[in-house]
Image (tube, rainbow, N blue to C red):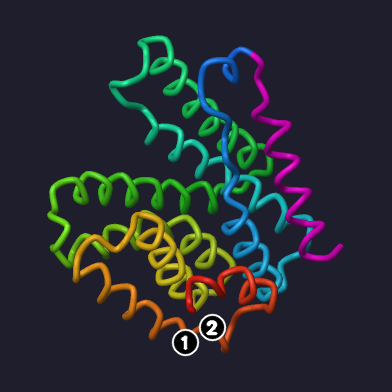
Amino acid sequence: MDMQQQMEQVRTRIQRAIAHSYVDRYIQPRIVDEDRILFALSMLRSAQVDANIALDYVFAMMFIQLALDTHDEIDEQQTIQQRQLTVLAGDLYSGLYYEFLARRHDISLIRRFAEAIKEINIQKIRLRQLSLDDLERFHCIGVIESALLCKLAEHVHADEWGELAYYLFSLKRVHRDGAKSKASIDYIDYCKRKLQDLLPLHIHEEVKERFSHLLA
């Protein structure tokens, strides 16, 4: 099975698992981040993880990401019902990941992902306290965007991929948010320089091609 087929299998599996007619009627459709899927699959292939186990790992990780992203969407613009359903949807996705890994008896990975969730939530709180010009905010962004991938890399003894995830997904987030300050522009340049050194060493061509627009 090639990388594209693996990606499609993970994406389809997730969409089937989260489909719920009542929830879908009231909250925005879930967006599955294919960049994360591709990066994780590439990392696990590099670490020579069995293909079926790799698919399970990425499936579980993406449920956590969906849970975190869903909770981030809660705002005062929503109706009470929408807010309640958004919270419950996020909790459901989190529960599905835990149930899935528990059935596999993968306690070590559950522990690592729990550590990542804790780190992400701490950095989200910290990020809200910092100004746009505060350089520490970029470290917060890096942890928020890469902690799950870093813990997965740690789990399969591919720590160098964690560093790559930190800079690559930091760069993606700052690009997405828009360079609103000199600090943002400088940080984008810094990430690009780091990635120019890291990318040739570890990453597969599919990932290079997918993220090439960020490095231009």
Determine whether the residue tagged by mark 1 lies in a helix, strand or loop.
helix
Q: Is residue 147 above or below residue 212?
A: above
* Residue 113, horizontal then vertical, whole percent: 47, 50
Magenta stretch containing residue 104, yes or no? no
Q: Residue at x 77, y 64 (%)?
A: 3
Q: Is residue 65 above or below residue 58?
A: above
**What's the magenta region?**
1-21
Q: Residue at x 66, y 74 (%)?
A: 47
In this figure, which residue is indicated by the disc labeled 1? 196
Q: Residue at x 45, y 81 (%)?
A: 195
In this figure, which residue is indicated by the disc labeled 2? 199
* Residue 140, horizontal then vertical, whole percent: 27, 58
Q: Is residue 39 left or right of residue 78?
A: right
In front of the other: 78 or 126:
78
Magenta stretch containing residue 18, yes or no? yes
* Residue 83, horizontal then vertical, whole percent: 38, 18
* Mark 2 vs 1: CB contact within 8 A: yes
Q: Residue at x 33, y 58 (%)?
A: 178
Distance Cα–Cα, label 2 vs label 1: 6 Å
Amino acid type assigned to the residue bearing label 2 in the image: Leu
Where's the N terminus, which quadrant? bottom right
Q: Residues within 10 Å of mark 2 (few under 14, many from 20)?
A: some
* Residue 17, horizontal then vertical, whole percent: 69, 31
Determine whether the residue tagged by mark 2 lies in a helix, strand or loop.
helix
> Looking at the rendered structure, which numbered label has been put on residue 27?
none
Amino acid type assigned to the residue bearing label 1 in the image: Gln
